[in-house]
Image (cartoon, rainbow, N blue to C red):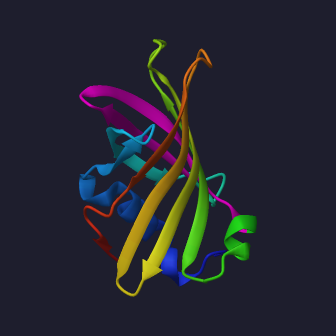
Amino acid sequence: MTFGSIFIHAQAERLIMNNAESYIGKIDNKAEIKVGFYSVFLDKDSPETYKVNGYSDVEGTKANFSGTIILNIEKTKKSPKGNLKIYDFKFSEKGTGKHNGTFSGDMLFLSLGKLAVIGFEGNWENYEKSLKFPVYFDNSNKIMNK
């Protein structure tokens, strides 16, 4: 396994699910965003890829999405600490309205003893390419025990 015993697959799925609680953050550095996952499962054809289904909720406007979280081996190797794993994520919202689009960026997984901190940082861009905002959400509202 490429990333050792810190982040085994079954544990990864459970940790990303965040005990079925939302990750909380900001979009465009001002509006609150909540992101949650309905399902997380390992892609049997690509052992570094997790397929996800979930939702985003920006101030009461909710959209379902599907996407991937993929271990970025090169970024992880460059990480100064062995307990930090870096993943690429891309979530595509369902719908075709002006406020539907794609989230993409980095997911950071930091293992601190028995605690797991997970944060997502990147951008949201609508499908029309007329809106693009920075986005960040994490589980600091509920730090997970491994």
Q: Quadrant of residue 79?
A: bottom right
Residue 140 falls left or right of residue 12 = left
Q: Does residue 55 show up magenta in the picture?
A: yes
Question: What is the count of numbered marks?
Answer: 0
Q: Nearer the viewer, residue 67 or 74?
A: 74
Q: Position of residue 44 (x, y in %)?
A: 59, 53
Residue 72 falls left or right of residue 97 = right
Direction top: furthest residue: 97
Q: Quadrant of the C terminus?
A: bottom left
Q: Quadrant of residue 30?
A: top left
Q: Identify the residue at horizontal 46%, vertical 52% (top origin).
A: 41
Assign the magenta stretch its main secondary structure: strand
Say if 1 sits above or below 142 in the image.
Answer: below
Q: Position of residue 16 (x, y in %)?
A: 40, 58
Q: Quadrant of the N terminus?
A: bottom right
Direction bottom: furthest residue: 113
Q: Position of residue 101 (x, y in %)?
A: 52, 25
Q: Identify the residue at horizontal 58%, vertical 70% (top origin).
A: 85
Say if 86 sits above or below 23 in the image.
Answer: below
Q: Does residue 42 show up magenta in the picture?
A: no
Q: Position of residue 69 (x, y in %)?
A: 56, 51
- Boundaries of the magenta span: 50-73
Say if 132 sits above or below 45 in the image.
Answer: above
Q: Nearer the viewer, residue 3 or 56?
A: 56
Q: Quadrant of residue 114?
A: bottom left
Q: Identify the residue at horizontal 52%, vertical 51% (top origin).
A: 121
Residue 63 falls left or right of residue 59 = right
